[in-house]
Image (spheres, rainbow, N blue to C red):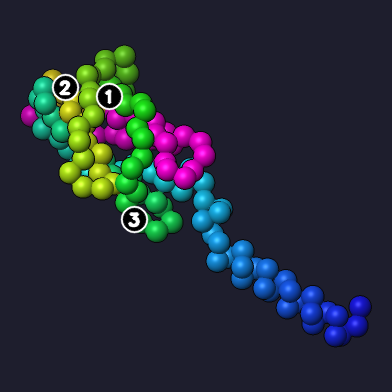
Amino acid sequence: MNFYNAKHAAAAALIGLAVGGANSKAWAGIDDYEFQLIQNAIKKGDAAIVAVRLIDKRSGKVVPDAVIFTQRVDMAPDGMEMMTAPIEPLPSKEPGIYRFKANLMMPGGYRLSLGAKVQGETGSLENKLEFKAIP
């Protein structure tokens, strides 16, 4: 390979890298998203509100319109995984924030388990978030 051909090959490789880097969304995966608790301590009661935000970890922006297909609250952090609490989804007041009404009748550690589909991504997102119910 002479200098002229090597120069063209290097230029083509750089163009390919630039075009591939500009289309980084194609490399996104379900692992690029996560749920985060809005509050780590929630007042106990039969109508406690647990709110989470779904974020894109690459940009830090909230992600609206996820389809949450599984939600569960249990007391696993306190060694009582089989002790579950009723939970139901509530309408969102702002995009990317997902709210649930839970029956947190006793103070202690709770775990919120969520399963969701993110629009435009393959696979399912699963997160387990721990929080405290306080008196």
Q: Secondary structure at mark 3?
A: loop
Q: Which residue bears the numbered disc 3?
A: 61
Disc number placed over residue 64 in the picture, else none? none
Which residue is at a point 25% across and 44% down the rendered structure image? 97
What residue span does the magenta drawing correspond to?
Answer: 111-135
Q: Residue 5 appears in which quarter of the rendering?
A: bottom right
Q: Residue 7 appears in which quarter of the rendering?
A: bottom right
Q: Position of residue 118 (x, y in %)?
A: 42, 41
Callout 2 amino acid: Asn
Task: Say whether disc 1 or disc 3 marks the residue closer to the N-terminus.
Answer: 3
Q: Is residue 55 visible?
A: yes
Q: Nearer the viewer, residue 18 or 130?
A: 18
In the rendered view, would you say 81 is above or below 109? above
Which residue is at a point 13% across and 29% down the rendered structure image? 48
Callout 3 amino acid: Lys
Disc number placed over residue 103 in the picture, else none? 2
